[in-house]
Image: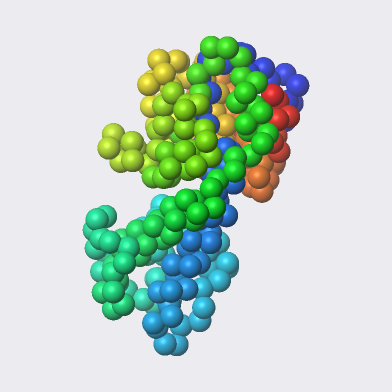
């Protein structure tokens, strides 16, 4: 299953890439933005221990934005009004909502990306450059900031379609581990699933690829674990896409 030698990019027409963790190392930026947001929020609460990385992994990591806010607050016994998607990130102390805090975290992510830029994984860039003529790459990401991240990485023009969290919300598509967002991208390209390959670093994303009946699912192990990605249905697992370029 981890036999990279038999995988040939030319066997596939559509190449469906996850973003965070496959194209760019942006998971770390999200982690820092969460910490800044919760540190600031908790500073106005007495008797609350500081926010830690353990809070991140226990309550926030991998969850959609507002779900992460809600889960962390619940773990601290804090109840806030849910608010709305359009609540501003700069709500005053005492008037914060769950969605306002989620939007504050998103504002911080975008500010970090703008200030620091995004450097894509060199092996992924090499892989994209080595794709055969006629290959049709697309992005399939849960993030609502996919365009911003890709622009920052200088890769926005490389992809024919971007199926991100905004598209999923608009089209009513369930997120990963459901295969719907990947299947939507293949449909936009007009390529049947068996002629498409999925590239994913997350167990939930690999599951989505396996459930969609795609020609191959390449697990990119950035820390999830080779055995875990294989068990989730990866056709092969690499530590970097350069291995199969
Ligand atoms: Mg990912």
Percent coordinates x, y for residue 67 in the rendering = 38, 58
Q: Residue at x 41, y 26 (%)?
A: 161
**Outermost bottom residue:** 47
Q: Give the side of residue 206 with respect to residue 1, left or right.
A: left
Residue 182 at least partly seen:
yes
* Location of residue 91 (image quadrant): bottom left
* Location of residue 118 (image quadrant): top right
Q: How is the image coloured?
A: rainbow
Please state, as top left, top right, bottom left or bottom right, where the N terminus lies in the image.
top right
Percent coordinates x, y for residue 192 in the rendering = 45, 15
Q: Is residue 76 above or below residue 205?
A: below
**Outermost front residue:** 115
Of 184 and 125, which appears nearest the observer? 125
Residue 102 at least partly seen:
no
Q: Give the side of residue 95 with respect to residue 76, left or right.
A: left
How many tags in the picture?
Answer: 0
Percent coordinates x, y for residue 78 in the rendering = 36, 76
Please state, as top left, top right, bottom left or bottom right, where the C terminus lies in the image.
top right
Q: Residue at x 39, y 77 (%)?
A: 77
């Amino acid at each position: 299953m981890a036999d990279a030698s038999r995988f040939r990019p030319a066997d596939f027409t559509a190449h469906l890439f996850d973003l965070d963790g496959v194209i760019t190392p942006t998971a770390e930026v999200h982690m820092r933005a969460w910490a800044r947001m919760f540190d600031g929020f908790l500073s106005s609460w007495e008797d609350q221990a500081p926010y830690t990385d353990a809070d991140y992994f226990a309550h926030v990591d991998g969850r959609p934005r507002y779900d992460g806010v809600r889960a962390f607050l619940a773990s601290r016994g804090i109840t806030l009004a849910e608010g709305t998607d359009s609540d501003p990130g700069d709500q005053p102390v005492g008037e914060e909502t769950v969605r306002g805090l989620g939007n504050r975290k998103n504002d911080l992510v975008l500010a970090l990306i703008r200030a620091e830029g995004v450097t894509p994984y060199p092996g992924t860039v090499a892989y994209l450059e080595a794709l055969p003529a006629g290959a049709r790459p697309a992005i399939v990401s849960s993030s609502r900031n996919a365009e911003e991240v890709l622009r920052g990485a200088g890769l926005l023009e490389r992809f024919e379609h971007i199926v991100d969290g905004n598209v999923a919300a608009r089209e009513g598509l369930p997120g990963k581990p459901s295969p719907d967002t990947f299947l939507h991208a293949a449909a936009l390209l007009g390529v049947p699933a068996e002629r498409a390959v999925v590239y994913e670093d997350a167990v939930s994303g690999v599951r989505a690829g396996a459930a969609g009946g795609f020609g191959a699912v390449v697990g990119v192990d950035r820390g999830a674990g080779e055995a875990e990605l294989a068990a989730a249905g990866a056709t092969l697992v690499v530590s970097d896409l350069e291995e199969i370029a």
